[in-house]
Amino acid sequence: MSTTTKTSAAPASSASSRAFPLTATALTATMALYIALVAFGNITDFGTNQQFVRHVLAMDTTFQDDDLMWRAVTSTALQDAAYVLIIVWETVAALLLMAATWFWARRDHRRGRRWSTYGLLMLMLLFGAGFIGIGGEWFAMWQSKSWNGLEAATRVFLMSGVVLIVNHLPSGRPGEADAT
């Protein structure tokens, strides 16, 4: 009489196929929560970061080098318009990441990837190009001891990049297309 041994162990890809959506959901939700709180804070406490944007654009706490000061934006109307655009950008990114979290939670990987890519790319553009590039270099924010947000911007830029990379890893599900 022959005996067959049945194993209850699932294929290796099964564990990763269950862990992947959980990881993508949790990381996307974390970024959605973060940027939603940032946008909410900027809306409900408008004046605090309004002053930050005004000082960075005015370049009034930099080294005051004549070769750079021509870049300063001293119009409060333009400064405030830039701040409102930042808040709108943050709000849209938060909404996209919330939608992406919903799709990930429902195991709709295709839409989860697509929407998280849009939201995370928006964060990387805002914090990378906007705050690090334009604020940090063009408006010389790195020179200010009082109004320097480069460390925080770098942190958000890197976190967004890590989540974006994780969200684009193969899901581990056999036969599932991982394309966005």
Image: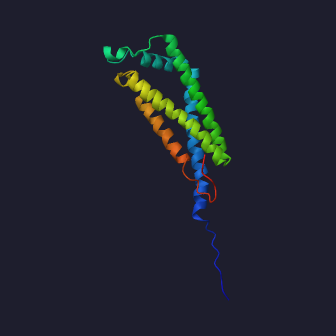
Q: Where residue 174 appears, x then y in whole percent?
A: 62, 60
- Residue at 59% x, 53% y is 171
Q: Where residue 166 appears, x then y in whole percent?
A: 53, 47
- Judged left or right of residue 32, residue 155 is left
- Judged left or right of residue 118, residue 136 is left
Considering the image in quadrants, where does the N terminus appear? bottom right
Q: Can residue 86 be seen in this view?
A: yes
- Residue at 41% x, 15% y is 72
Q: How many labels does the image show?
A: 0
Q: Where residue 121 appears, x then y in whole percent?
A: 54, 36
Q: Where residue 149 appears, x then y in whole percent?
A: 42, 27
Q: Quadrant of residue 112?
A: top right
- Judged left or right of residue 157, residue 28 is right
Q: Which of 33 and 54 is in front in this view?
A: 54
Q: Which of 80 and 47 is in front in this view?
A: 80
- Residue at 36% x, 25% y is 142
- Residue at 50% x, 32% y is 125
Considering every residue shown, the one lying at the far bottom of the view is 1
- The answer to whether 119 is drawn above or below residue 75 in the figure is below
- The answer to whether 11 is drawn above or below residue 99 in the figure is below
- The answer to whether 128 is drawn above or below residue 79 in the figure is below
Q: In which quarter of the image is residue 137?
A: top left
Q: How is the image coloured?
A: rainbow
Q: Can residue 65 be seen in this view?
A: no
